[in-house]
Amino acid sequence: MPEQNHLGLLLTGAALALRDRVALPGSVLHENGGEVSRATLAAALNLHLLAGLLERVPSGRAYMDDLEEAGRKLVFDHGAMRTVAMENMGTLPAGLAAISRVLEPLGYHATNLYPMARLKMTGRSFTHRDLPEDLPQFFVSELHPEQFSPDFQAAALRVTEESSDPLTAVDLVRLARLAGEGSLPFAEARALLPKLALCFTRRHEAPSLADYEILKAESAEMAWIATEGNAFNHATDRVPDLHLVVEEQAARGRRVKDRIEVSASGRVRQTALHADPVLREFRDADGALILHEVPGSFFEFITRAAMPDEDRLDLAFDTNNAQGIFKMTAA
């Protein structure tokens, strides 16, 4: 293997093109040798997931072009995804477990819990142990079907009951080695990366339109999961001046959330572009596939102030902020 940096060798296509457009720590950019660290593999996964989101979100691609035009790199603050805390979803682990089993070996640990009672969901933040401010956090939410009606629960099960687990026994062994040793041989890391990325996709088949309508009547979030699965719900740029970003995006004719969400501490402020619509397949009453337009993913902006009397950013989230931002995917 030539002496090149690991990150460049792990990435391909659109993810590789993002390497020079996203702010990354030097330790990740210049790592080479026989072993790939968990931080570098985490960075590679994040760039892969960001590339996937930008493919689905034209407004996000346009914003990235704005950054390139201004000569600024994206400061990737966090990505978010949604899960369903329900058993019997085929071979896919229930809820948070489907994601945490990937994040923890990569060096992430759960840092805070965010009950979102209005949405009947629970959010958790995962922060990287080695590079907490320099690698994106993950905001993973679980929806609780048992808090909804029996019809809703039955529809949720029908949608997800044949979900497939993308990870094989070999993948799990590699994750265990990564968790124990903090690194993997390059060939194993390269083989594992695309399998990890599949954990952040929809793992069930096209839902019936009837089930989708049942879910949407009670939860826009579960309706979104029915079409998008565990994909990145949004990705976020950490910006120094949120008001300036809002003004610039509005001036470019992009649909920006009508208010900025401010945390209880006052240190975290967030807003977002509205979700871009996507065409998704559904089954009609006769089982035939039809196309229907639904909300897709979106792009978010955040500012974080420093903790009082400390030389570190406030990396926390806020329950009310999160519930407000989630409205971006309401139909």
Image (cartoon, rainbow, N blue to C red):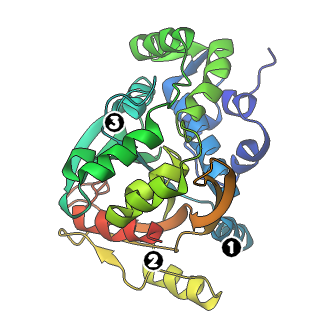
Q: Give the numbered dot on residue 96.
A: 3
Quadrant assignment, res 109: top left
| Earlier-in-chain disc, 1 versus 3 | 1
For residue 271, say whether it is visible. Answer: yes
Q: Is residue 65 above or below residue 46?
A: below
Could you say where residue 122 lies in the image, as x and y percent from the top left?
A: 25, 49
The kind of residue on which mark 1 rests is Asp
Q: Which residue: 68% across, 27% down?
A: 6
Quadrant assignment, res 220: bottom left
Distance from the alpha carbon under mark 2 to that under mark 1:
15 Å
Distance from the alpha carbon under mark 3 to that under mark 2:
33 Å
Give the side of residue 148 with respect to residue 230, left or right.
left
Could you say where residue 2 lies in the image, as x and y percent from the top left?
A: 81, 18
Q: Residues within 10 Å of mark 3 (few under 14, many from 20)?
A: many
Secondary element at tag 2: loop
Q: Nearer the viewer, residue 117 or 211?
A: 211
Q: Which residue: 29% across, 61% down?
A: 306
Q: Are marks 3 and 2 in contact (CB under 8 Å)?
A: no
Query: Which residue lies most toward the bottom here?
Result: 251
Q: Give the numbered dot on residue 134.
A: none
Q: Which residue position is annotated with label 1?
A: 66
* Quadrant for the N terminus in the image: top right
Secondary element at tag 3: loop
Q: Which residue position is annotated with label 2?
A: 241
Q: Residues within 10 Å of mark 1 (few under 14, many from 20)?
A: some
Give the side of residue 245 with respect to residue 22, left or right.
left
